[in-house]
Image (cartoon, rainbow, N blue to C red):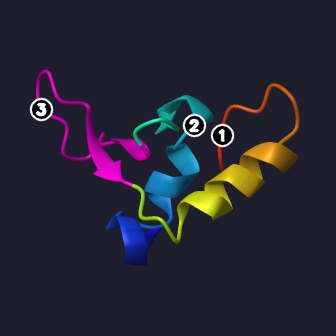
Amino acid sequence: MARYLGVRVPSKPFSTTWDCVNWGDKTLRMPSPKTEVPGKAYRVVDVPLPVMPHFESMFEVAPPGSTYIFR
């Protein structure tokens, strides 16, 4: 995620939930508690084509009711 999405590791990936993934737009809403300003608690990043299949396969094998992408 650091390489393709430009996010801080490990804090950002481990706080990202499945509801942050916009499957249709192929984007990811990244929580930004460290740089949060009023009205902007997150930023939206595009998920590159090479990364999207990995999100899809992780979602398929995630236990029902899972909240976080990475456990």
Q: Nearer the viewer, mark 3 or mark 1?
A: 1
Q: Secondary structure at mark 2?
A: loop
Q: Secondary structure at mark 1?
A: loop
Of the pair 18 and 37, the residue shown nearer to us? 18
Asked if the magenta segment contains residue 43, the reply would be: yes
Q: Which residue is mark 2?
A: 17
Above or below — where is 36 with respect to 34?
above
Identify which residue is drawn at 52% across, 38% down.
Answer: 23
Give the residues drawn in magenta, as a range: 26-46
Give the residue at the far bottom of this rendering.
3
Q: Nearer the viewer, mark 2 or mark 3?
A: 2
Q: Is residue 57 visible?
A: yes
The answer for how far apart the CA atoms under marks 1 and 2 are is 4 Å
Q: Is residue 71 visible?
A: no
On the rendered structure, is 51 left or right of 55? left
Q: Which residue is mark 3?
A: 37
Circle nearer the N terminus (2, 3): 2
Does the residue at mark 1 contact the one at mark 2 (Cβ under 8 Å)?
yes
Local crowd at mark 3 within 10 Å, few (<14), some, or many (≥20)?
few
Q: Position of residue 59 (x, y in %)?
A: 74, 45
The answer for how far apart the CA atoms under marks 2 and 3 are is 21 Å
Identify which residue is drawn at 60% across, 35% down.
Answer: 18
Asked if the magenta segment contains residue 39, the reply would be: yes
Circle nearer the N terminus (3, 1): 3
Q: Secondary structure at mark 3?
A: loop
The answer for how far apart the CA atoms under marks 3 and 1 are is 24 Å
Q: Position of residue 15 (x, y in %)?
A: 52, 44
Circle nearer the N terminus (1, 2): 2
Local crowd at mark 2 within 10 Å, few (<14), some, or many (≥20)?
some
Q: In the image, which disc is placed on residue 68?
A: 1
Badge 2 amino acid: Thr
Badge 1 amino acid: Tyr
